[in-house]
Image (cartoon, rainbow, N blue to C red):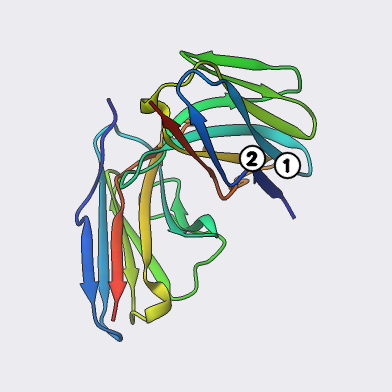
Amino acid sequence: DVKVTQSSRYLVKRTGEKVFLECVQDMDHENMFWYRQDPGLGLRLIYFSYDVKMKEKGDIPEGYSVSREKKERFSLILESASTNQTSMYLCASSSTGGFEKLFFGSGTQLSVL
Amino acid sequence: EDQVTQSPEALRLQEGESSSLNCSYTVSGLRGLFWYRQDPGKGPEFLFTLYSAGEEKEKERLKATLTKKESFLHITAPKPEDSATYLCAVQALGANSKLTFGKGITLSVRP
């Protein structure tokens, strides 16, 4: 089975801190994605990557950046955390043309105080 | 703009009581419609992809159907372990087209 592992289950940070969320997948998938999930808003795409060192903006990239130096690892960076970035962050990967059959990690619940 | 509306927001069923979850969508040319299941504290898990009107897919007690405007997830004789949030998403035609998710339907099945 595909495994997508997110480095932290829960994270508490202070406003203004730089935050790194790490995601690793073990199935040699080309495509990786970062979503955030908020009550009443559903899943929203932040950034995605089709290949190493490639990145594309999703629907809500403001305040975030990403890094993909290796195929299996996709990092989400909050340059200066703000309280409105408190959310559940979900990483996903896929092997097919793009968004077909996403495999999700268990999520990181980030609280920014 | 692509839109996905799921209804009802929450559904409570008695074990064995069959029902359907609705996903209405508007998209400028459908590439695919996706159903996911999400358990509390976990990421969504892929269930089905439907590509064209009239298509149906089944998995255990679940059957997904698709028309030009909506999709239904039919649950036959549900069990408590079917309790979860069910997410619907659509992908429009076009290169690098992203998924648009609905807000989900929370299903509770009482024993």
Q: Chain of mark 1?
A: B
Q: Return the residue at label 2.
A: B90
Secondary structure under the numbered disc 2 in the rendered image = strand
Q: Chain of mark 2?
A: B
From the viewer's perspective, tell me whether residue A80 is left or right of residue A26.
right
Q: What residue is drawn where x is 30% and y is 47%?
A: B41
Judged by depth in the image, the label closer to the viewer, 1 or 2, is 1
Q: Amino acid at mark 2?
A: Val
In the rendered structure, are the residues bearing label 1 and label 2 in contact, judged by CB atoms less than 8 Å apart? yes
Number of marks: 2
User: Where's residue A94, x and y in %?
Assistant: 42, 36
Q: What residue is drawn where x is 65% and y is 42%?
A: B7
Taking depth in this image into account, of A63 and B76 the one nearest to the observer is B76
Mark 2, other Cα within 10 Å: few <14 / some 14–19 / many ≥20: many
User: Where's residue B16, x and y in %?
Assistant: 49, 18
From this view, report whether residue A32 is shown above or below residue B1: above
Q: Quadrant of the C terminus of chain A?
A: bottom left
Taking depth in this image into account, of B45 and A29 the one nearest to the observer is B45
Tell me which numbered mark, 1 or 2, is placed earlier along the sequence. 1
Q: Examine the image and state in which quarter residue B99 appears.
A: top right
Q: Amino acid at mark 1?
A: Tyr
User: Residue B93: in sight, yes or no?
Assistant: no
Q: Return the residue at label 1.
A: B25
Q: What residue is drawn where x is 62% and y is 27%?
A: B20
Query: Residue B77, which numbered label?
Result: none
Q: Quadrant of the N terminus of chain A?
A: top left
The extreme bottom residue here reads A16
What distance separates the C-alpha of mark 1 from that of mark 2?
A: 8 Å
User: Residue B3: in sight, yes or no?
Assistant: yes
